[in-house]
Amino acid sequence: HAASNHRRPCHTMDKSITLPPDEIFRNLENAKRFAIDIAPSDKLYEISVQEEVTARLHFIKFENAYIETCLDFIKDHLVNTETKVIKATVDKEDEMTCLIKGCNFVLRNIPHEAFVYAKHADSEFRFQTTHPDIFPYLLVNIGSGVSIVKVESEDKFERIGGSSIGGGTFWGLGALLTKTKRFDELLQLASKGQHTSVDMLVKDIYGGSYGSLGLTGDLIASSFGKSATADKEFSKEDMAKSLLHMISNDIGQLACLYAKLHNLSRVYFGGFFIRGHPVTMHTITYSINFFTKGEVQALFLRHEGYLGAIGAFLKGAEEDNPNQYSWGENYAGSSGLMSVSPDMYPMQRARSGTFDMLEMDRLERQLVNLPLLQDASSYIPDTVDLTEDAQAREYWLYCFEEALDGVVKRAVASQPDMPEAAERAEKFRQKYRHKLQTLRHQPFAYGSLTVRSLLDTREHCLNEFNFPDPYSKLKIIIVSSLVERPWLVDSYDQWLERLKGPPHKCALFFVDNSGLLSRGTEVVLASNSGPALNDVTNGELQILTERIAAMDPVIQDGLKEDRLTLVQSGSSSPCLDLSRLDKVLAMVVRERQTDLVIIEGMGRAIHTNYYAMLSCESLKMAVIKNSWLADRLGGKLFSVVFKYEVPADKADEDSALLTPS
Amino acid sequence: HAASNHRRPCHTMDKSITLPPDEIFRNLENAKRFAIDIAPSDKLYEISVQEEVTARLHFIKFENAYIETCLDFIKDHLVNTETKVIKATVDKEDEMTCLIKGCNFVLRNIPHEAFVYAKHADSEFRFQTTHPDIFPYLLVNIGSGVSIVKVESEDKFERIGGSSIGGGTFWGLGALLTKTKRFDELLQLASKGQHTSVDMLVKDIYGGSYGSLGLTGDLIASSFGKSATADKEFSKEDMAKSLLHMISNDIGQLACLYAKLHNLSRVYFGGFFIRGHPVTMHTITYSINFFTKGEVQALFLRHEGYLGAIGAFLKGAEEDNPNQYSWGENYAGSSGLMSVSPDMYPMQRARSGTFDMLEMDRLERQLVNLPLLQDASSYIPDTVDLTEDAQAREYWLYCFEEALDGVVKRAVASQPDMPEAAERAEKFRQKYRHKLQTLRHQPFAYGSLTVRSLLDTREHCLNEFNFPDPYSKLKIIIVSSLVERPWLVDSYDQWLERLKGPPHKCALFFVDNSGLLSRGTEVVLASNSGPALNDVTNGELQILTERIAAMDPVIQDGLKEDRLTLVQSGSSSPCLDLSRLDKVLAMVVRERQTDLVIIEGMGRAIHTNYYAMLSCESLKMAVIKNSWLADRLGGKLFSVVFKYEVPADKADEDSALLTPS
C-alpha cells in the first residue's frame, strides 16, 4: 500500500503559518476526499484527507485562528480540480453521528486507543487492550456543554443525558473571574492554584472528617464556599483550580450515575475540555474513582480530537463501505499523544500554527482475532511493556538507535538503481531518530511502547521514504545451527512424546524467515501480507513454495490435495498480533479445525506471544539473537526457546490419550 | 391542653432587636427544654422551646446576626433557673440525624406539610395529603453543599450522594461575579436577570433545536458559555440568574438520577438554598420536571427550616419518647409559609430581627387512619379546597370575618367571672382578624385553606387567649325541625329498605352537637377529645349518657352490656379528619367489626368527608345552615343532606341480601 507515496515539494501557506515540509498535506494532490469537522464551539478544526492511491487517511488539527488560511490553501490547491468533494459536518444531526462513528472507528481499528490516566503512577498512561466487542459503552463528550451518550451498536446510540456545566462554563466563568480569555491559559492558571483557599472543605465546617457520613475532611463541601463571606481577594490561580474541580467532579458524578443506571462499565471521556490536558484528565479520573470507588474507570482516547473528522469522513465515504476494511495507525505520519499538550509544551502550544496529525493506513481486508485464543479479551500480544519497564525501554531505544546506521545502509543498497535513494535514506534516518527521541521522553506517544511498536515505527518510516522492502535483495533462507540441549526453554521431550500420539488435524504455522514442516497433519502457512525486515511475505512464499514443490513430491501432493495452504496473516510487522489477523485466515483456521499453532522467530514468539494462551496445543520456537534479551531471560546469546504448551483443560484429556494407563 | 397558658408581660431584648409582644417566647419561663440548631454555614438559627405545662413546642428562626442577643436573652431569663438544659446540635454526627428526625416528624405530624411548587398555576402551592407510610423518601438538602439522603425508616438513613455545587457556590460565585455579598440580594438580582444573555443555548449553536437528540433550542447548552469569548460586560442580574439556573439544574439532575437509581418517587428538597425562596423552588421544580418528564415531583416542606431544631429537640427529649404522641400545628402561634419570604416581603426581610415561628401542640395519644377508609392514601378530608376555589375562599373569609363579633361576645360571656376576659377577647379579635387578612393574601400559609382550617385557626386563637370553650355555657341539645322531603340529598328510602335487612354488627357514630341512635346494632359514639364550637366533648358526653341512661333502660342496658361505647375521636375541631383519629378508636372499630359509619353535622359531613369513600356502609347527615353553601350545593337554607352510601364491592352482595330475587 505504501509503494506509491509521491514526494512533493514543501508547501508554504501564503498567509500566516508555515507548514513543515514533508509533514502536512504532503500528498495533497493525490487526495480523493476531504472531510472538515467544524465544531461550532470547539476551538480546533480537523481536516481529513483520503489519498486515492495509497488508501491512507490524513487527519490534521489546526487552531481555529488559522482556519481561513487553511481553507484558502485547500481551495487553491485542490478544489479547482474536478474530482474533489468538500464535505463539512455542519449538519445538526450529523455532529453527534460523526462523533460516534469516529469513536467506534478508533476503538475498533487502533490498538491501545483507550487509556486510563494516573497522574502519580510510574507511567501516567495505562493503555487498554482493545476488547473484541467494543459495545456497549458510554461516551461523555465535554465540549461547551456535556453530552452523555450511550452507544449500543454501530448504528444505535442515544443521548441519555447531558449538562450545561462543561468546558464553556470553565471558560466562561473562568474568563469572568480571572479576566483571562484563553482556555489554555485558564488551565495553566488552574494547574498552579490551590482550590482549598476558595472551596469550603468538610473540615472547614466540622473541624475534621464527618465520619458517620463517610466524608473525609479534605472533601469539598461547597465549591467557592469560602468566597461567600470572606472579605478578601482570591488569586486567579486558586479560583481557576476551584472551578476546574467543581466542573470535573460534577461531570464525573453524572457520568457515574448514568453508567450505573444503564449498567455500563466502559466510560470514555472526550471533547475539548479533556483534549490532551493532563490536568482535566486527572480531575475527571479522580472524580470517577471517588464516586464509583473504583468500579468504573475513566477512559480517554488517544485520538479523541479526531472523532468528528473521522466520522465525517466515514459518512462521506459510505459508498466505499469503509467498514469492510481494517485500518492501522501509521506511526510515521502521526504526531502522537501529547505532542501539542499545553502542559508538555506550553510554548509550542502558544506558537502560531501548531497542529497535530493522525494517519491511518487502510488494509484491504478485515482483521479479526485468532479463533484459537483462549481469552481474546485478555490477550496481550507484547511480552514486555516498555512504557512500564524503564530499564528495558532504555535498552531497546539504545539498541534501535545503534542499529540505525545499518538499516540506512541496507535501505540504500535495496535500491541500487535509484540515485536519490541516499537522500531519502538520510531523511528516513532523521525521522526515525526523531521518533526515538520523542519516545524516550514520551514513551506513551503511540500507546504502550513495545519492541513490536519500535519495529513497526521503523517500517512505517522506511515506507514513508519509499523503502518498502529494504531486505528485498537480501532475503535468504538461513538454517541456523542450534546450540546443544538442554535449551533455555526446552519442552522438546514432551513434544516428541506428543508426536507418538495421534497426528494433529491441522497445524497453523506463523512463519518468519525460514522453515516448513509436514507430517500427516494439514498445514496452514500464515505469512506476512506486506514486507517487514527480512520476513517472507505471502507473495514471496507463494513463489518459494512452487519452486520447492517442483523438487519435493510431499509438498507437491500437499498443495495439490489442499493439505498445504498458504494464507496471509494480515500483518506487515516482524511481530505478531493475534488479535488483528486476516479474516480469511481465521476462517481457514476454523474450517480446518486447527489443533496446533506454531509460532516461530523472535518477533513472533519472544517479543510478542511469549505468554499468549491458546485454546489448542502450541509450539513457540525461537533462537534469541540478542544478548541483552538472552541475559534477561536467563540464557546466553543464541539460546533456544522451544515452548510446547497444552491448555490446562486439554492436558488431562491428552495425557489420557497419550499415556495408556 | 391549652388551659394553662400564662400571660406574660412583653419581653424586650436588651441589645438590638425588639421582640413583638405576645409572640416570641411568650411562655418562656414555663419552658422545660431548649434545642438550638446552629448549622455551621446556614445563616438562620432555630431555637425550640418545649413548655412543660402545655406540652407545646415553640420554634423560632432568627437571622444569625442576632444570635448573640438571643443567646444572652435566653441566658438571662432561663439558664439561671435550675431545671433548664441547653442542648445544641454541634455534634458532627447529630446534624444529619437531627435533620432526618425533624423531617420524619413534620411529615408524620403536620398535614399538608409537603407541597409541589408551580409558579404559573392559579395556586402556586399544591399541598400533598400525608401518605400513611412516609418511607422511603429522598431528602436533598441544599446548604453550602448538597447532601442527598435516602431515608428508609425512622432510624435508617444513608447519605447516598452529594455535590459541592450548592448554596455556598451560588453565594460564593455570585459574590465574586456581582460584588453582592448578601444571599437574599443575590436571589433578588437573579429574579430580575435574563440568563440567555450569559448562557449559550442550543439555538445559539445550532440555529434552532437539535431535533434528533431531542434538544429544544431554548435549552441551555453551556452555562456561562457566552462569557467565554464575548468581549463585553455582563449585568449582575443576568450573571446571577445564569448561576441560579446552573446550580438548580445540576442539583435537579443529580436528585433525579439518585431517585431513579434507588427507585424512589418522593423527593423532598430543603436547606437554605431553597428555604422560602420562590425563585429557587421554581428552578428546582423546572429542572426535576425536565429531567424526569414528570415521573418524579419536586416536593418542598412548609417547615423545612425547622427540621434541624425539631430533630435536635426530639433527640434531647428521647427519654420522653416523643413519638408516642401525636402533634398538631398550632395555627395561632405559627407564622405560616412565606411570612418572611424575600420575594413577598423584601422590606421585612431586610429589617432587623425578622423571625419565623412554628408552634406544635402535643396530643397525648397517637392519631391514626380510620381503618374503614377505602383508600387511606387518597383520602382528602376537605370537600372544597379554598386555595384553589377563589370564589369560595372569598365567601368564607368574609363569612368568618362577619361572624367575628359574635364569637368575641360569646367568648366574653363564657367567662362571666373573669374581669379581664373582655381585654383578652379583644386581643383574640385582633389576632384572628390578622390571620384572616394574611390568609386572604397568602391562602397557602398553613397548607390548603379550607373551612376546617378556618375553624381550627379560630379555635387555636381562642385557646391562645384562654378561651378554650366559649360555648361551655351555651351547649344545648337542639332537635331541628326538618324540612319536607324530598331532601337536597335524599337516600332515605334506600336507608329504610336497608333497615329491613339484617342489623349491622356495629355502628360508628361521629356525633356533633346532638343525636343518638340504637337498634340491635352495637354503637360506638365518637366525640371530640377537646372542645370546639358547641360540639359535645367526650367528657360531656360521658355525663350526658349517664343521665340519659338513668331515664332510658335501652341506653342503660347498652352501656351495661358494652353494646354502647363512648370513645374520643382525637379531634378538637368542628370538622373531622378521618386520617387523624385516636388510636383507641381505630382499635375499637376493628375489634367490633364495625360495618356502618354515621357522620353528622355540617363540619363533619359537608365541609369535610362529603366525598370520603368508606369500605363499609355510611350515612352522612346534615342540615345546611348556611345559605351561600346551600345555594352552591343547589338547595336552600336548611336543606337536608341524607347520604346513604354502600361501597361498590358491597353493593351487589347487599342487594342480593336485601332483595330476595
Image (cartoon, coloured by chain):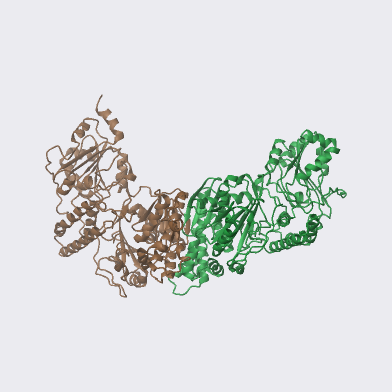
Chain colours: A brown, B green
Front one among B319 and A617: B319
> How many circles with numbers are drawn on the protein?
0
Indicate the quadrant containing the C terminus of chain B: top left, top right, bottom left or bottom right: top right
Q: Position of residue B352 (x, y in %)?
A: 59, 67
In the image, residue B560 sits, relative to residue A178, either above or below, namely above
In the image, residue B312 sits, relative to residue B282, either above or below, namely above
Report whether B358 appears left or right of A199: right
Res B211 visible: no
In the image, residue A304 sits, relative to residue A294, either above or below, namely below
Report whether A302 appears left or right of B487: left
Front one among A109 and B633: B633
Front one among B526 and B418: B418
**Image quadrant assignment for residue A594:** top left
Q: Position of residue A278 (x, y in %)?
A: 34, 60
Q: Position of residue B228 (x, y in %)?
A: 43, 69
Report whether B340 appears left or right of A562: right
Front one among A448 and B428: B428
For this orientation, the residue located farthest to the top is A661
Q: Position of residue B181 (x, y in %)?
A: 50, 68
Res B237 visible: yes
In the image, residue A250 sits, relative to residue B324, either above or below, namely below
**Image quadrant assignment for residue A314:** bottom left
